[in-house]
């Protein structure tokens, strides 16, 4: 019985390797990017791109292990969810009230340290915000909310 379960599990694991979700990559211009409507200091933009854009933009940098399922499917769901909550490349389309709320959330995430998510930081240790980077983002976002 255990052998049949293991074989079934192995078959499912092999089959799901052929499931490939669409990649969140774009080389197109981003006319609705946050920077088209709001001033972003260079130091803040650099941190946002490095620590936030993989999940919150229209262009994710995929590591090699996303080709292994179910890891790729799990990461895809995180990117889709991240973009649903906040997309820096579509930010200029947000109504003013929503944009102000997003600035509050960016400020809170940087201040309280709940972004980037812990699973992301396991592999991307350099994406962790330093206290100075957090302060810069908090001050920038706080001024725009």
Image (tube, rainbow, N blue to C red):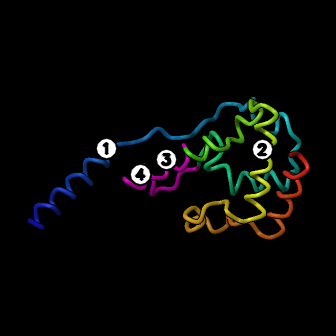
Q: CA distance from mark 2 to mark 1?
A: 40 Å
Point 88% across, 45% down: residue: 144
Point 62% across, 50% down: residue: 54
Q: CA distance from mark 2 to mark 4?
A: 35 Å
Q: Dot 1, crowdedness within 10 Å: few (<14), some or many (≥20)?
A: few
Choose the circle earlier in sequence order: 3 or 2.
Answer: 3
Mark 1 or 3: the one toward you: 3
What percent of the width, then of the height, locates residue 76?
49, 47
Query: Is 126 left, or right, of 25 in this rendering?
Result: right
| Residue stretch rendered in magenta on the structure | 61-80
Prevailing secondary structure of the magenta residues: helix
**In this figure, which residue is indicated by the disc labeled 1?**
18
What percent of the width, then of the height, locates residue 114?
67, 63
**In this figure, which residue is indicated by the disc labeled 2?**
101
Residue 67 numbered mark, or none:
4
Mark 3 or 2: the one toward you: 2
In the image, 92 versus 15, the foreground residue is 92
């Amino acid at each position: 019985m255990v052998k049949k379960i293991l074989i079934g599990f192995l078959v499912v694991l092999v089959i799901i390797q052929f499931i490939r979700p669409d990649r969140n990559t774009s080389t197109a211009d981003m006319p609705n990017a946050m920077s088209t409507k709001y001033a972003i200091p260079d130091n803040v933009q650099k941190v946002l791109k490095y620590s936030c854009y993989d999940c919150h933009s229209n262009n994710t940098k995929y590591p090699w292990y996303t080709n292994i399922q179910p890891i790729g499917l799990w990461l895809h769901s995180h990117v889709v969810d991240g973009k649903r909550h906040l997309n820096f490349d579509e930010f200029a389309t947000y109504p003013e009230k929503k944009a102000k709320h997003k600035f509050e959330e960016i400020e809170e995430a940087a201040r309280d340290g709940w972004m980037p998510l812990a699973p992301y930081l396991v592999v991307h240790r350099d994406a962790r915000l330093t206290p100075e980077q957090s302060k810069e983002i908090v001050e920038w976002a706080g001024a725009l909310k």
